[in-house]
Amino acid sequence: MNLLKRWYYLACGSGKCKKSVTRKDGQLWCDTCNKPVSYPRSRFRLQVDVMDATAQTVIVMWEETASELRRSRRCLMSLMR
């Protein structure tokens, strides 16, 4: 797992929207919902570098898959220290 890459992102906290938020005019904004986001939700985005003697590839695991690893965000943050 590549912990040097950002392993989470801030997502819109509105309903079922999972899209990332951006900064717009000093506040967090969801372009998909077209509205400001007061309480974003952190969501997993784990990048796993997989290789053997013949090839290398990158796999990205999003929230639903990454959460099956049974590691909390807090646990991953402690690994980065």
Image: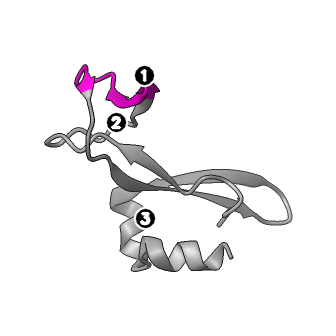
Secondary structure beneath dot 3 equals helix
| Distance Cα–Cα, label 3 vs label 2 | 16 Å
Of labels 2 and 1, the one closer to you: 1
Q: For this rendering, which residue is in front, 40 or 69?
A: 40
Which of pointers 3 and 1 indicates the residue nearer the eye?
1
In the rendered image, residue 38, in percent from the top left (x then y), is placed at: 26, 40
Residue in view at x 42 percent, y 20 percent? 25
The crowd level at tag 2 (other Cα within 10 Å; few <14, some 14-19, many 20+) is: some
Looking at the rendered image, the quarter that the N terminus falls into is bottom right
Residue 13: which numbered mark, if any?
A: none
Residue 4 placement, left or right of 35: right
The image position of residue 3, as x and y in percent, is: 66, 64
Which numbered disc flags the more N-terminal residue, 3 or 2? 2
State yes or no: discs 3 and 1 in contact (Cβ < 8 Å). Answer: no
**Residue ID for mark 3:** 66
What is the CA distance from the residue labelled 2 to the residue labelled 1? 15 Å
Q: Which residue is mark 2?
A: 19
- Helix, strand or loop at label 2? It is loop
The x and y percentages for residue 72 are: 41, 76
Q: Give the quadrant of residue 17.
A: top left
Three-letter amino acid code at the position of disc 3: Ala
N-term-proximal mark, 3 vs 1: 1
| 24 in the magenta segment | yes
- Tell me the amino acid under the disc marked 2: Lys
Note whether 12 is above or below 22 in the view shown.
below
Q: Residue at x 54, y 74 (%)?
A: 76
Tell me the residue that label 1 is attached to: 24
Picture layout, residue 46 above or below residue 30: below
Task: State which mark lies toward you, 3 or 2.
Answer: 2
| Residue at position x 38%, y 55% in the image | 42
